[in-house]
Image: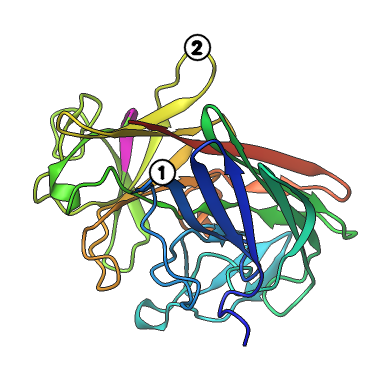
Amino acid sequence: MRDPTGEQYEIEYDDQRVVVVEVGGGLRTYAVGDWDVLDGYGDDEMATAGRGQVLAPWPNRLEDGSYEFEGRRHQLPLSEPEHTNAIHGLVRWAAWLAREHEPHRVVLEHHLHPQPGYPFMLELRVAYELSEGGLAVRTTATNVGTETCPYGSGAHPYVSVGTATVDDIVLRVPARTALRSDERGIPVDTLRVDGTELDFRAARPIGRAKLDNGYTDLERDDDGLARVELRADGGRGVTLWVDEGYPHLMVFTGDHPDVERRALAVEPMTCAPNAFRSGDGLIRLEPSASVTTTWGIAPQE
């Protein structure tokens, strides 16, 4: 019998352990000793609520699944039918192949072939690597077709500091601007976070707040990284960092039946939701061109 997520690729470094899966090339588990840093899922389960999945060639939602690019209109399947959106790209349920596998590192690859709604060709590679500093995830997309293509990517980890719910997490999000979205999750406006309930630039408890918000205009440290910080009161902490290739983040308090506020989704995104229509952060990838972006997780006991 095969696992629902196909081959399981395990990597380790000291007491850190990660399992990455064939289906979707996603991150199933990340543990440090007996601490589950991610709210993952079992080897006998499929991924639900986007847990640990790779989001490409666009993250988040695309309104009506339709867009225009280079003067041509394209229609994608409505993978979020309740809101008539296409959501989280085309590779979440595809098979990925392991191209490199060392004790502390694995590289998965998927070739995205032309299809209705996205008649372009991409080679996608995701490298997961453990080190003393935690987990780094490096995503590279190469346009192996003959036409310029629209591209964006993201990831969907649910992070835990060991609290029963996210209510007890002290959160810092270094973002000056938030996206205001409609009931379908499509951005309609931006707002400065100053003085609003979405301002987490100074660390504070989440409490009963329900977050499902995009953030941008990120404050970065001298090394160019933006760092989202989670901490249990007096206990464990996690930093999720993104390089300059990720100007957007989605923060979701896990208000979903499969998560039930156990963990906080902090989703790196190279572009805003609906970027295939709005152009906000959209990457125009020329033939033979590549783009590489990196994010990671640093646990602190």
260 vs 29, left or right, is: left
Query: Which quarter of the rendered picture does the C terminus lie within?
Result: top left
- Residue at position x 24%, y 57% from top? 262
Amino acid carrying mark 2 in the image: Asp
- Which SS class for mark 1? loop
71 vs 155, left or right, is: right
Mark 2 or mark 1, whichever is nearer to me: 1
Q: Is residue 242 magenta?
A: no
Amino acid carrying mark 1 in the image: Gly
188 vs 290, left or right, is: left
Query: Which quarter of the rendered picture does the N terminus lie within?
Result: bottom right
Question: Picture quarter containing residue 232?
Answer: top left
- Specify the principal SS of the magenta part: strand
Label number found at residue 33: 1
- Magenta highlight range: 174-178
- CA gap between label 2 and label 1 equals 31 Å
Q: Is residue 171 visible?
A: yes
Q: Which residue is mark 2?
A: 222
